[in-house]
DNA sequence: TTGAAAGCGCTACCAG
DNA sequence: CTGGTAGCGCTTTCAA
């Protein structure tokens, strides 16, 4: 029944042996009712003198309100649940950074879950995040288990799927079509005069965005009648710089006459370029290399890397805005007009092609 | 008084117009008391037949327990508060990744706060994170406002400060001395034969770890009697690749005979190297460049970058372990034996020096 | 193994 | 502008 008088860990120092102050303690010390304390904290109208007295009591007792009690009583938390596949790729950490910038300013707190590209873990995560009655949810991708979709739909809170533009989102979506973006890059390479164009990506099917890029590559290769697709898939997704080298070797072993390579990410493109250097191949003289994502490495590498530029942080910011709008509107994200928020991308032409 | 019958956002679909199921609904449907439902959820001993009946009711109603109510009643949440300065540097996102890997497995949920290197924001953040009665706290750095320290101390929960090793931590610390690490790098450069060694870092004083590295540089320069320190500070911390170039220009303008540069990070080192290429300077022939952090770019750049290797993700993992140990031990982190957890670092010698 | 009652700390509602 | 009352949904305690 209820909290023990002593908190669990009390060995830090003796002052923590006294139970933390409650709102009733503050009320007693200030000579007012709990309600008045509550009003002061919420910023509601309270006589100035009373407010100051209460504030002094709060400071004196180092009172920290209990958010769980508040949430239970008011039926609303200040949580936003955020689900990303990983934080080691700078992609999603930039998105989370954009989310925090937008949502923390609005007084929301980020409840973060990392799925490691595992749909099952995603489902468990969503389930436990929803226990906290978040005000809204931002989740990466459009590929979820049926149970996950149901959970999110039933939750009744605004949901944004990020980094993709599914035809039928759970609620709102902020992203772009990875397939179309990849097609655009292939198209650019063809315009540039390349014809024997290969694709280099990770071996795992869990990275949907990587898979979609590959799909776009296939489509455009077929549309342009460029013959057999040249596809090398190597290493766990998301693939890193160190995979680019071996992948390039494998590629040239199978298709030595390849004249351009589109990589699933800038990191792998960078790795491939380094491998070209080692093999004495000139980029783009002997072979062109393109990336995806426009990470800093793309701009700073030698040669600098032609890539698809996507504003990862912007996805976070736009997602935050869409969620806040839905909250303000007391509606779903879709009803608030953000069912499909298209994020711009563009081929940034640099030296490597 | 209490929750309204209808959740806030109910426009998603008509099924969400019915109030979500409560434990009492499950109990009624299963023909048992709330307590039995609670026991089933907690995994306590319940007759198999009863347990199955309850589970069916849970599934049928799509019941999601309310964590706020549970936390209020039991006096314990499943939160771990995590505070980092930024997520755009891959440093801290790797640490958060390590934390999630360790702590989510233990059933804890990450409440994330991003301070943007602002001590005031940190204080506000810690204050609002503590409202949620987290089980433990992981915070970056050892530099906090007095109020922040007091808040954390009074909270009575295990705290780990990451990325530094203060003599007098709030509770536990997992990190290393940035100053010593920087000295080690300067020492290495001296051993290598360089004498006119410069330091290149960000202009802001908010990045304590950058400041500490600068301090270490100064100390070693003095210890080795290498004359006047050559220091260029440019751009907001943490400085990025694009700052490396201008900073190198500024450096060579003031001290044209510099023979080695230690950069505050690999990213700035990479930018500086690119600038050397543009200026026709050979690295390390004309000038040596060293970085800090051992990011992927350091290994893949041409020339590859000599750097101080720190296991950022490992800091997160070790922090998670220290916190879990304290929780299991029902004590502070310090009492659980992790007052100072030293993280190894080493100078990784590559081509750039 | 199960149930009933009490109450965690706070806020909504209404009265004054 | 302020206070009393009721109760949010769950777990604890104790009794059966």
Image (cartoon, coloured by chain):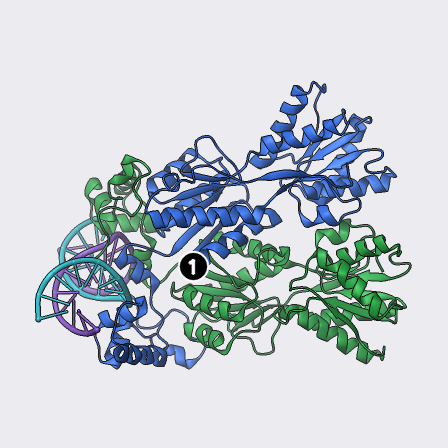
Chain colours: A blue, B green, C cyan, D purple
Task: Tally the marks.
Answer: 1
x then y, percent, for residue A294: 66, 44
Q: Residues within 10 Å of mark 1 (few under 14, many from 20)?
A: many
x then y, percent, for residue A284: 81, 36
Query: In which quarter of the view is residue A70 placed?
Result: bottom left
Q: Check the residue under mark 1 and report the chain it is in.
A: B
Residue A239 shows in this picture:
yes
Q: Which quadrant: the N terminus of chain A?
A: bottom left
Residue B177 shows in this picture:
no
Query: Helix, strand, or loop for circle 1?
Result: strand
Q: Which quadrant: the C terminus of chain A?
A: top right
Query: In which quarter of the view is residue B118 placed?
Result: bottom right
Query: Left or right: where does residue A197 sit relative to residue B50?
Result: right
Q: Is residue A111 above or below residue A12?
A: above
Q: Residue at x 24, y 46 (%)?
A: B6
Q: Is residue A278 above or below residue A1?
A: above
Q: Which residue is mark 1?
A: B79
Q: Residue at x 46, y 63 (%)?
A: B328
Query: Left or right: where does residue D9 sit relative to residue A67?
Result: left
Query: In which quarter of the view is residue B249 placed?
Result: bottom right
Q: Residue at x 42, y 68 (%)?
A: B127
x then y, percent, for residue B89: 63, 57
Q: Is residue B167 above or below residue A152?
A: below
Q: Is residue A340 above or below residue B121?
A: above
x then y, percent, for residue B279: 86, 56
């Amino acid at each position: 029944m209820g909290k023990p008088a002593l908190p669990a860990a009390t060995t830090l120092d003796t002052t923590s042996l006294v139970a933390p102050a409650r709102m009733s303690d503050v009320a007693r010390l200030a000579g007012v009712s709990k309600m008045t304390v509550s009003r002061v904290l919420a910023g509601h109208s309270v006589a100035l003198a009373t407010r100051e007295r209460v504030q002094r009591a709060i400071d004196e007792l180092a009172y920290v309100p209990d958010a769980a009690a508040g949430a239970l009583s008011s039926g609303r938390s200040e949580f936003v649940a955020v689900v990303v596949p990983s934080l080691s790729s700078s992609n999603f950490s930039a998105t989370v950074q954009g989310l925090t910038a937008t949502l923390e300013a609005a007084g929301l707190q980020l409840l973060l879950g990392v799925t490691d590209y595992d749909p099952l873990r995603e489902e468990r995560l969503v389930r436990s995040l929803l226990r906290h009655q978040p005000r809204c949810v931002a989740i990466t991708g459009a590929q979820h288990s049926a149970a996950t979709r149901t959970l999110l739909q039933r939750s009744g809170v605004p949901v944004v799927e990020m980094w993709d533009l599914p035809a039928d989102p759970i609620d709102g979506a902020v992203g772009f079509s990875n397939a179309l973006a990849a097609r655009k890059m292939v198209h650019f390479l063809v315009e540039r005069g390349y014809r024997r164009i290969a694709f280099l990506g990770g071996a795992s099917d869990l990275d949907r965005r990587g898979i979609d890029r590959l799909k776009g590559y296939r489509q455009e290769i077929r549309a342009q009648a460029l013959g057999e697709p040249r596809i090398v898939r190597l290493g766990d997704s998301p693939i890193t710089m160190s995979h680019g080298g071996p992948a390039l070797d494998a590629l040239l072993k199978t298709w030595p006459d390849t004249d351009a390579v589109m990589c699933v990410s800038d990191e792998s493109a960078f790795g491939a370029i380094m491998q070209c250097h080692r093999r004495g191949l000139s980029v783009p003289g002997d072979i062109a290399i393109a990336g995806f994502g426009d990470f800093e490495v793309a701009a700073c590498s030698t040669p600098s890397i032609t890539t698809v530029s996507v504003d990862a942080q912007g996805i976070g910011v736009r997602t935050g805005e869409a969620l806040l709008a839905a909250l303000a509107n007391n509606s779903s994200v879709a009803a608030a007009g953000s069912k499909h928020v298209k994020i711009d991308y563009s081929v940034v032409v640099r030296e490597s092609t």
